Image (tube, rainbow, N blue to C red):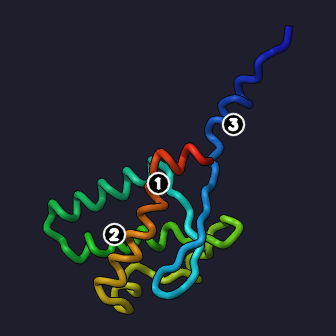
Amino acid sequence: MSTYDLSALKSALLKSKTAIITAEIFGTTVYLRRMTAGQLIDHEEALRDAQVADDARKASELSVQLIVDCLVQPDGNDIPVEDKPTAAELLQAHDNVALLNAIDTVKKHAVGKLEDAEKN
């Protein structure tokens, strides 16, 4: 009778599968990762809290932070923090239309759709 390795099962179930896409934002080719469900919940809760507090600047920065948080290297590895722009820097560099387009592009991948998940 073979033994079932429960620790290997748990480890396998908790290993994230990184889904990377190439996209264009702000006229530049970037690599984006999909966020975990927990990261998305944290983001949405922080955004909701900023909106409830009527803190428009914080809400905008959190929305733009989503872009920064999803940027990765082509192989899916994290980009060092010092090599990524901050949300505040992006807010100063781009107009609302460009920012909203970039956020939309990132959200489409960060959140994903069931059809995309089924392909993976």
Q: Residue furthest bottom?
A: 93
Secondary element type, mark 1: loop
Mark 1–mark 3 Cα distance, whole angstroms, equals: 22 Å
Q: Mark 3: which amino acid?
A: Ala
Name the quadrant of the N terminus: top right
Q: Quadrant of residue 99?
A: bottom left
Helix, strand or loop for disc 3? helix
Pinpoint residue 72: horizontal percent, then vertical percent: 60, 70
Marks 1/3 in contact by CB < 8 Å: the verdict is no
What residue would you read off at disc 1?
112
Query: Relative to 41, is 98 above or below?
Result: below
> 31 and 113: which one is in front?
113
State the residue at coordinates (50%, 56%).
35
Horizontal and vertical percent for residue 59?
A: 26, 70
Q: Which residue is mark 2?
A: 62
Please identify, in this view, whether the residue under mark 1 or under mark 3 is nearer the observer: 1
Q: CA distance from mark 1 to mark 2?
A: 19 Å
Counting other residues with Cα less than 10 Å from the Cα at mark 1, is it few (<14), some (14-19), or many (20 or more)? some
N-terminal of the two: label 3 or label 2?
3
Q: Residues within 10 Å of mark 3 (few under 14, many from 20)?
A: few
The answer to which image quadrant residue 48 occupies is: bottom left
Q: Answer few, some or many: residues within 10 Å of disc 2's Cα (few below 14, many 20 plus, some between 14 and 19).
A: many
Q: Tag 2, which secondary structure?
A: helix
Q: Which residue in the structure is indicated by mark 3?
A: 12
Disc 2 residue type?
Leu
Q: Is residue 97 left or right of residue 89?
A: left
